[in-house]
Amino acid sequence: MALNRSNWRATAEAIAIPIVAILFALILFGIFCAFCGKNPLSIYGAIYSTAFGNWRTFQGTLLRAAPLMLTALCTALPARLGLMIIGNEGALVMGGIGATIAGLMLSYGSLLPNVDQVKNTLGLPSLTVQIGMALGGILFGGLWIAAVGALRHYRAVNETISSLLMNYIAIALLNHLVEGPMKDPASLNKPSSFPIPDAYQLSNISGTRIHYGLLYGLIACIISYFLIQHTTFGFAARTAGGNVKAARIAGLPVGKLTVIICFLAGSCAGLAGMVEVAAVQGQANGSLVAGYGYAGILVAFVARYNPLAAAIVAVLLGGIINSGGALQRTFNMPDATVLVFQGLVFIVVLYSESLYGRLKIFKEAEVKAPPPSAASTAVPV
Amino acid sequence: MSTKRSLYLPRRQVIRGILATAAFGATSKLWTGCSSTPEGASGPGGDASPTAEGGKPIVIGFIYNAPKDDYGWNQAQATGAAAIASIAGIKIVEQESVPETKEVQEVMRNMIEQDSATVIIPTSFGYFDPHVLQVAKDYPEVQFFHSGTLWKEGLPKNVGSYFALVDEGQYLAGRIAAQASKSGKIGFVGAKPINPVLRNINSFMLGVRSVKPNVKMQVIFTGDWSLPVKEAEATNSLVDQGADVIAVHVDSPKVVIETAEKRGVLSSGFHSDQSALAPKGYLTGTMYNWGTIHKKYVELLKSGKTLMNGGIPHQVIGGIAEDYISLATFGPAVTDAIKKDVEATKAKIVDGSTVVYTGPIKDNGGAVKIPGGKKYPVTAQELTQIDWLAEGVSGKTS
């Protein structure tokens, strides 16, 4: 790809195609709404005003986008290495478990504190506990997906299937822990771990109701972008993703790259789990399994594995989820309506990828060589 | 110039498309989303029925954690909502399939800010802590009626709990099951071995044993509130082991009832009325009459009473005597003799001469859990500590 000359056309292509695709999906959705007997224009209006209309509702959009940014990276990063990992949900759950264990140990010194320990917390500064929880989440989530990478590299186990199956193991482990070894006896009807003390929970960004998880997400996306696009490590990973044999011949440590990238990917999702525990639930329980992981896969696909684009797509998806409630309450449409919209957007955007490199308007005039094959165009700039 | 090949799809892209569709299916639970509810099937909704009475209507927001036509917990709540939707001066807004995350906090805020709701009824157990408590602090003027028994002194004044105790209903359902069963074996599909489910099982079993002390009951816990595949497997294996009545306590008994009907055995439901799902084998089941409670709230609200000024109690709780629960439509297997027995027993429960938890009651290991002479009414605190299965039930609590 022509990185060395002015590539405004490629940039314009990368921006125009998704926008046109989303508009097209909106039209399809409008037709669907019309069939349901609703006025599409007023529904568009409601979606816009709920998702992005004013600062109060936009906060709701950002709040929903926060975990998706992190879980999207769990698919996006390994994809640059040619691996299709869909273990985001499991890594998130493991991260939540890790963060809870770290949080409980650092605040009470025990997973099952007795009455005395609850009263007299260890009294560590809250920043220490929060960093400990973040590290716990990163470590558990990272190791979970690193295991997938290692199985892939050393034992040739298909990473898509193993990561998917490991989701179920992680969820089962969570249920086992909160119903057994880590159960707070007070949580009779909804088995949960002991709660992290309020003082140690992540607060909201001042003046908003958005927790700091959004900031974590944005930072993780930016770091990942620079790591992949602007470092030798990222270059090596992309090379191995392009052609493993060539990368081996060039002497790149493919195994190490695989495991490290998988660890980073899992640690992002694990961090999302930590945020869920530290900022939202305050303890580990079944509510951790909320589908953020699976939604993150979609975000990564639509963002074409570009970490920066993932942040934007996450906000878009957050907006769609946000507007779903208004459709139900104002238009009395079933809850599946917003899923229809979401599905249309994703399918149209994904299939719009086949347009890349095929539209004359985005071609450099002097290019004489045949257009690059579709496979190589699938890798974003 | 040479882009003659029009749209062809490289394999990579097709695989990605399929994966994306699968992931989408997984996130969106398409199988539940598809169940056909044209709007307002279970309730006329609140759409544009401007109420007279001068002033603005009281807007009540209902939040459910699954589709409101699930034949289970959520349908029972939505039926309660529908019961008050047409009352003059009341407007309801509803949102279904809301997970127990920040999402439910956002939904509550949106109902308050956009729909001007002044009363919120979050119906899922897991909404309470931390979600309802956090939002309630931010909106001290809005009242939150949570479905459960979680409100305690010291929690925000604008939060209240309402709940119905099902023990007496399940006791009656157990009596019916015992009389209808021929094999003397009953199966029970439960979600998790936690107090409300264990109480449900024990109440049912006490009902069974009050008629036929030798009947055995086998319990299978699926491990979670909504696992349709495991629920079907559990039902099948219970039938294979000889059970001819299947009772159930999961979020939506639909799968269990339908599977039992297919296998030609009797079934006893829960939460709401499932008689339409099993016209042959359905016996009955305890169903919640949330409408009774909701109507009571509406009456109080319309007369200006609130939780904050003490006009509305923070804990509303009751059982069969208050009509908070009742038995669902009887199926054909419930004979007139059984119906007569149910009427008589119900009358005894209401007047207090029959108490479900009357000692001595042993657990299934033989240990006496409630000593002889003790009688615990359904509201007794001791019953919330039950973590055992009653005599005659085979199954483990952990």
Image (tube, rainbow, N blue to C red):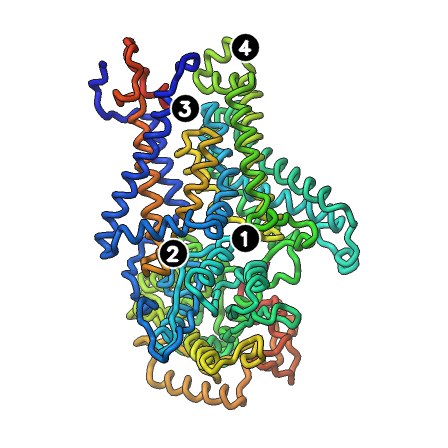
Q: Disc 1 to disc 4, how far (Cα)?
A: 45 Å
Marks 2, 1 in one chain:
yes
B52, A294: nearer the viewer: B52
Residue B15 pos. (x, y %): 34, 30
**In the picture, residue B172 is in which quadrant?**
bottom left
**Depth-wise, is mark 3 or mark 4 nearer the camera?**
3
Q: Is residue B42 visible?
A: no
Residue B258: which numbered mark, if any?
Answer: none
Circle 1 Cα neighbour tier, 10 Å, few/some/many (<14 / 14–19 / ≥20): many
What is the three-letter code of the residue carrying label 2? Ala
Q: Which mark is residue A380?
A: 3
Q: Are marks 2 and 3 in contact (CB under 8 Å)?
A: no
Between marks 1 and 3 in the image, the one whose residue lies nearer the viewer: 3
The residue tagged 2 is A326
Residue wearing tag 1: A286
B192 versus B28 height, above or below: below
Disc 1 from disc 3: Cα separation: 37 Å
Where residue B124 appears, x then y in whole percent? 49, 63
Q: Quadrant of the N terminus of chain B?
A: top left
Q: Residues within 10 Å of mark 3 (few under 14, many from 20)?
A: some
Which residue, given by chain and number where applicable, does mark 4 sit on?
A: A251
Structural distance between the alpha carbons of marks 3 and 4: 25 Å
For marks 1 and 4, the one nearer the N-term is: 4
Question: How many neighbours does mark 2 have within 10 angstroms: few (below 14), some (14-19), or many (20 or more)?
Answer: many
Q: For the point 48% across and 60% down, which residue is it?
A: B108
Instruction: Have a look at marks 4 and 2 and say if they share a chain.
Output: yes
Q: Callout 4, which amino acid?
A: Gly
- Cα–Cα span, label 2 and label 3: 35 Å
Write down the chain letter for disc 1: A
Instruction: From the viewer's side, name the closer residue of B127 and B22.
Output: B127
Mark positioned earlier in the residue sequence (2 or 3): 2
